[in-house]
Image (cartoon, rainbow, N blue to C red):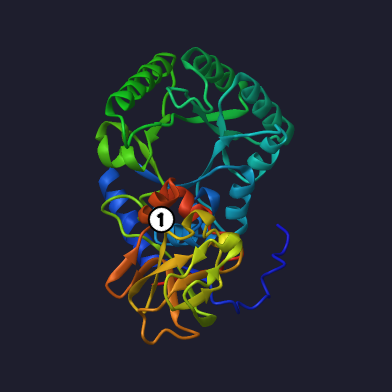
Amino acid sequence: MPADPTAAVPILRPTRAEISLSAVRKNLVKLKNTAAPARLLFVVKANAYGHGAAELARLAEREKLAWGFGVSSVEEGLALRAAGIAGPVLVLGSLYPFESFVEAINADLMVTIASLDAARQVIEAARKLGKEAICHIKLETGMGRIGARKPSVLKIYDELSASGAVSVAGLYTHLSSADTDPDYTGAQLSIFSETAGELEARGARGLVFHAANSAATLNFPVSRMELVRCGIAAYGLAGGFEPALSLKSKIVFIKNVREGAYISYNKSFRADRPMKIATIPAGYGDGYIRRFSNKADVLIGGKRCRVLGNVTMDMTMVDVSAVKDAAVGSEAVLLGRQGGEEVTAQELAGLADTITYEIVTLISARVPRVYVE
């Protein structure tokens, strides 16, 4: 992997994402205990949902908190290998171009096969390298994303198992509504169970069957099977788990404005009284999105301070009129806890009409991740 050109750049701007290793550890232990005897695949795609894949995968592997790791692409898998991760890594996405199978096999990444074309390509790549490929077949049960339906899964299995070049290690599906629709989830699991039974009737042995994401792991014990794939709960963004990520910065400028003064682009806020306003060096370029304009609260001095005007690319203004000792250098918490107050990812997601996944994954690469115990 090429050297990181920013690696030697000192962290000077006060905006940072703090990730609690103890919270991630507690969450993974809770998931392992809930899922047992099923094994835990720790899903670290999208830079571990914004939390930093390399650092958290190293933690999990070092402390044996997970059996393996789930990523979305070969590139993410290669990044884990470059970070020293030696354990199982499953690429959950559909590989294209097919040449990427070569890179995956070379790096001992397990690949997802969701079509006959992909099956033939992975066989060709494995024979070309003279190295066995390991794959999991993806079954479509109702997600409507990637996956082969049952008749194709059976053909894929026959072709792969007869090739002598590929080991079929597992069969899996993705549950689309485990957090909202138990009937639909049950129907998906029925399709999966039927397909798994037909594979075993064809002589398939030792396959790892898996379907459960975080919501299913917690709510549908029957879905746990031999392996569960958990992401959002591991980061504390599911009920009963401890949030691991805080987005913090510091005030860099304070001004007093008169009644009638405008704040930010397009005169998007007008002061209805004299106010004290702080500027924080974080904006939508950092993943603190414009949908928070005039809606979100930032914690300063243990108090909720409303965002004023449009969030800009690099800066956000907030009302600190009620914070007596607010000053340049005072801590500002955009996501997380300060004193007795907390701004949660769920709260921000509600303001932006989105989901918690998007709130944390949008935190951009220019925000340094700082790991704390």
Q: Residue at x 53, y 61 (%)?
A: 268
Residue receiving disc 1: 348
Determine whether, in the image, residue 202 is placed left or right of residue 337: right
Q: Quadrant of residue 180?
A: top left
Residue 6 in percent (x, y) is at 68, 69
Residue 78 lies, with reference to residue 281, above or below; the image says: above
Q: Residue at x 49, y 59 (%)?
A: 293
Residue 225 lies, with reference to residue 344, above or below; the image says: above
Task: Please count the marks in the image.
Answer: 1
Q: Residue at x 65, y 21 (%)?
A: 117
> Please, what secondary structure does the residue beneath circle 1 have?
helix
Determine whether, in the image, residue 362 is placed left or right of residue 343: right
- State which quarter of the image contains the C terminus: bottom left
Residue 264 in percent (x, y) is at 57, 66
- Extreme-front residue of the structure: 260
Residue 297 in percent (x, y) is at 39, 65
Residue 65 lies, with reference to residue 168, above or below; the image says: below
